[in-house]
Image (tube, grey):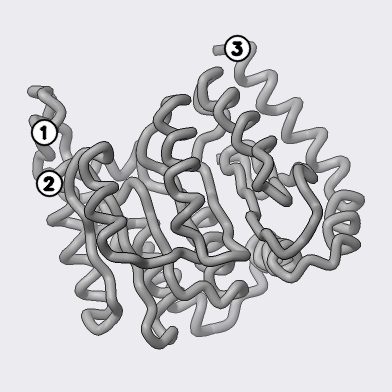
Amino acid sequence: MIYSKIKKHLSITLNRLNQTRVLKLMNTQQHPTLNNIVDAFLETKHVLHTEKDLQLFQDCENYRTQLLTNKNLISYDVFGSSLKNPVYSICEKASSKPIWGQFLYKLIKNNNSKNVLEMGTNLGVSGSYILNALKDTANSHFISMEGVPDLCNIASQQFNSINPKTQHSIIQGLYDKTFAELYKKKIKFNLCFIDGNHQKDPTIDYFQNLKSRLDLPAIMIFDDINWSNDMQSAWEIIKSDQDVCYSIDLFKWGIIIIDNSVSDRNIHFNLHLSYS
């Protein structure tokens, strides 16, 4: 545990020291999607938001506040577990912090992403930021995948309250069975947010399976890439894949760009957005 914390702070310190140079280097690539990620990063880090954005962020955080007072129990019997956790505890431990939700929102807005996939709905906090980013996008699609029925029900109510007209759905079930349902929808995604299983092999499988479901150039985000040695290994494999043009290591998130129209491959960057 101590070694892990030392490694984290050392990595973040080095990223912060080199950040100005890295941002300039990213801009010299002159890749539109990469430039949009840089813009989203700077806008989030330096709180360069419009009044409309700030109001939407507040709406998302009001939802989080409601969850933090919710004592209803969530059952995990779908996984064969007798474990039951209160909603407030799940929200405290598993929901993305505000700055990451804001960054996700900016990534979608700045890239004009139309079709977004989320693996790992949880309570719908990240999904709230996603749906708000898609609010003014005509013919948008947001699909979220989640194994726990109780979580699906809570998130679905929240998503419907944001914008019932937006084309969104939650696919409930274990991922090895629900990918077939996802493929039936025949949607190609501009952005995928992978936060459903923090294990090496499943994470790599999701990456490989989703590559054929992308509308290029596309962004894929992997949460908690430093969660464990297995996740670190998965991230190393993913960012070095022959189809990956650029990767950005934010310690918590790993972001990749896939774009077959350019010859660049496996160009890696490190940035720092937040400690949490």
Identify the residue under disc 3.
Answer: 2
- Residue 212 left/right relative to 73: right
Of marks 3 and 2, which one's residue comes earlier in the chain?
A: 3
User: Where residue 149 is drawn, which disc sits there?
Assistant: 2
The C terminus is located in which quarter? Answer: top right
Q: How many residues crowd around disc 2 within 10 Å: few (fewer than 14), some, or many (20 or more)?
A: some
Q: Residue at x 38, y 78 (%)?
A: 140
Q: Give the quadrant of residue 90.
A: top left
Q: CA distance from mark 3 to mark 1?
A: 35 Å
Q: Do the CB atoms of the residues marked 2 and 1 lie less than 8 Å apart?
A: yes
Instruction: Please state if 40 lies on the left or on the right of 209 as rendered.
Output: right
Q: Residues within 10 Å of mark 1 (few under 14, many from 20)?
A: few
For label 2, the SS is: helix
The alpha-carbon separation of the residues under discs 3 and 2 comes to: 37 Å
Q: Nearer the viewer, residue 31 or 228?
A: 31
| Residue corresponding to mark 1 | 78
The structure residue drawn at horizontal position 89% and vertical position 55%, both measured from the top left corner, is: 25
Q: Residue at x 43, y 44 (%)?
A: 209
To which quarter of the image does residue 62 belong? Answer: bottom left
Separation of disc 2 and disc 1 at Cα? 8 Å
Which of 217 and 62 lies nearest the eye of the viewer?
Answer: 217
